[in-house]
Image: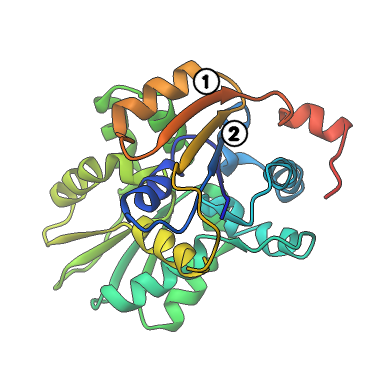
Amino acid sequence: MKIGIFDSGLGGVNILNSIIKSNLPLFDDIFYVADTINVPYGNKNIQELELIVGNIITFLESKGCELIISACNTSSSTVLNNLKQKTKIPIIGTIEPTINFIKETFHYKNLIILATKVTIESRIFENTLSEYGYNVYPIACPKLVDAIEFKNPSLEIEELLNRYLHIEIEVNEPIGILLGCTHYPLIKDQIKDVASKKFSTEIIILDPCERISTEALNLISKDSSINKSQRLFIYDTFDIELLKKKIEYYFKFDKVNVHFEKISNIKPLDELKINQPKY
């Protein structure tokens, strides 16, 4: 089975990495699109996101993908349900697996959600998790994705985290912090350090990436035809050499044959507005 995965940049590689590490031979080729020419997605409006994500889905369809994973909370929380209706290929997002992960693993009340501005404004996590009895503290982190994507100095990221976590919570039990953007696991140790200094209680970091990959793998038929070479194609829409350096810094893919390629048929937003895709 051919799998397509996409994100605005580096964040979705966390989910890609979980799939590779699963050791389950349920796929042959994986196509990963890092749409860094349009990063960050979190400052785009709904119409813009539909153009961008629809264009990527079209590209992954052209590669013969039989399953697509939106490894991006921003697109998953806003436009994915609409775009699912316009393709026959099954698409899995991040929202439902993340909510299932929280319900099953976090058994305290106070829950901070760190996510992009668009994800927070969608209220998808806040509304759903509040219904399950959590005291939810949604925090938009509008500059954090860029800081991670472009490897800003650690002190700059720490300053952002201190600013975003400047909230008051009356605590008598551990606080959970949901990493509501797939970029954030790349700095989860730093998030925990900053939060531990801010709040006088135990901090539990909730990273749903492995759960998202598990639910995606559960959709794959074990009877699928398998190419044991398991090739991984990583595409970037802006600077493939820069992406390659960042991936090699954070991850090690030694179980698959990796091919890096820059693609030009996924366009920047301004061009998409002129030449709208079929979505």
- Name which residue type carries label 1: Ile
Q: Is residue 57 above or below residue 275?
A: below
Tag 2 residue? 35
Location of residue 141 in the rendering, given as x and y in whole percent from the top left corner: 44, 44
In the picture, the quarter occupied by the N terminus is bottom right
Mark 2 in CB contact with mark 1 (< 8 angstroms):
no
Please identify the quarter of the rendering in which residue 69 is found. bottom right
Residue 89 appears at what percent x and percent y? 69, 60
Quick one: label 2, few (<14), some, or many (20+) residues within 10 Å? many
The residue wearing badge 1 is 240
In-image side of 175 versus 3 (left or right):
left
Q: Using the rendered view, name the quadrant where residue 270 is placed.
A: top right
Tell me the element at label 2.
Answer: loop
Image vertical order of residue 24 relative to residue 243, above or below: below
User: Which residue appears at 20% of the width and 43% of the height?
Assistant: 189
- Eyeballing the image, is 54 above or below 210? above
Give amino acid for label 2.
Asp
Looking at this view, is 255 or 49 the one in front? 255
- Which sits in the foreground, 49 or 166? 49
Gap in Å between the C-alphas at discs 2 and 1?
Answer: 10 Å
